[in-house]
Image (spheres, rainbow, N blue to C red):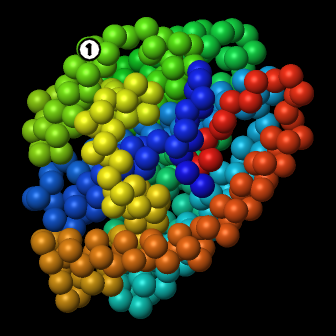
Amino acid sequence: MRNRVGVGKRRGYMPGLDGLRAVAVLAVVISHTWAQALPGGWVGVDVFFVLSGFLITSILLSEHDRTGRISFRSFYVCRALRLLPALAVTLVLGVLIAYWLYPGSASDTLTEAFAAVFYVANWLVALGGVHSGLLIHTWTLSIEEQFYWTWPVALYFLLMVGSRRVALAATLLVLGVVVAHRLMGVSSFSFRTDTRADSLLMGCAVALAASAGLIDLLSTKIIRGAAVLAFVTLGLVLAGIQPMSMSGVGYTVVGVAAATVVVSVALRPVRLAARALSWHPLTWIGQRSYGVYLYHPLCLALLAPRLGTDGPAALAATLIFSTCAAAVSYHYVETPFLRLKERAKNRHETATRAPDATAVEALRTA
């Protein structure tokens, strides 16, 4: 149940990707609990989007390499087993906490829960719906799920009609359309799928470029220089230094930086970056980052009456409680379903593996 990247050549477990997940979720938690300490903590969301695009595309390309097709049934069964159990717990707990401690926002929280079930929470916010419930953070999950609904079909079609490079060109074209759409001044651009899909597509593009052998053409000096520039860019934005408009190319710049970090950690490892992000405490949190993201607003809601909603005390307590909640969830809620996911994937791989095919290891979790 670890990250295994198999794009273009065999690659083993990449702990740096889990470390990157940890940094992303910690940035989000800090921005929600002590905003002044990390004004640009929202960057963590875009890092997650890039990772999702990269990892999901890696899974699909690996299966296509192995079998010549993409099983949508297997893909969606695996996604459901990975995502739904912890989400269901979060929605139930969120509604219960709202009715118990925050009756004034209980109705909004219930509405958000229903929207999250159907993965349209981002549009609920973007179209002027509720903004004050305890489950508003599920908007990011909705954007990712909408990506899961559409991207496998689109990728399969692109691979049917052209090469990996054709698929890459089409992906970059759509990415440009997303940026142009945002430049038109669309309202609520932060929550709309059509204006936030560029980071997801950036991750897809990296996986396609690696599969087409394009990233291997870059020199080590270029990779290292790009990695340094990417880390500096993300650091500046995290610190609240944003020289560009987020409604324009800002999100895209962040997405490019995050995609470059993925390359420097997973595909063409830069030693210092890969080692730093492979630090065991980071990888441990990264493997449980989904739960940390889901549960941290609920932990903050429980702690807020005593500690407030912003400041070092709120941050420290929320980090501790949400990490513990995520660890319990990972062990008792997510892991049993992840085992089912592994068995379903293994059965599918056994049933579809051709005798003379070159097996390319797919990603085990995303």
Question: Of residues 244 and 19, which is closer to you in this image?
Answer: 19
Q: Is residue 127 visible?
A: no
Q: Is residue 4 above or below residue 182?
A: below
Look at label 1 and name its amino acid.
Answer: Lys
List x then y, in percent, for residue 353. Answer: 85, 33
User: Which residue is identified by label 1?
Assistant: 221
Q: Residue at x 25, y 36 (%)?
A: 272
Q: Secondary structure at mark 1?
A: helix
List x then y, in percent, for residue 45. Answer: 36, 47
Q: Residue at x 76, y 48 (%)?
A: 345
Left or right, 231 with reference to 84:
left
Q: Is residue 46 above or below residue 294?
A: above
Q: Is residue 52 above or below residue 243?
A: below
List x then y, in percent, for residue 149. Answer: 65, 41
Left or right, 280 with reference to 339:
left
Please tell me in which quadrant of the rendered image residue 134 appears.
Answer: bottom left
Question: Of residues 69 and 143, which is closer to you in this image?
Answer: 69
Q: Residue at x 48, y 11 (%)?
A: 214
Please tell me in which quadrant of the rendered image residue 306 appears.
Answer: bottom left
List x then y, in percent, for residue 95. Answer: 49, 79
Q: How many marks?
A: 1
Give the class, few, some or many, for how many residues have Cα within 10 Å of label 1's Cα (few <14, many ≥20). Answer: few
Q: Residue at x 37, y 20 (%)?
A: 180
Q: Is residue 106 visible?
A: yes
Pick the quarter of the image with the N terminus: bottom right
Q: Is residue 159 above or below residue 335?
A: above
Left or right, 117 with reference to 311:
right
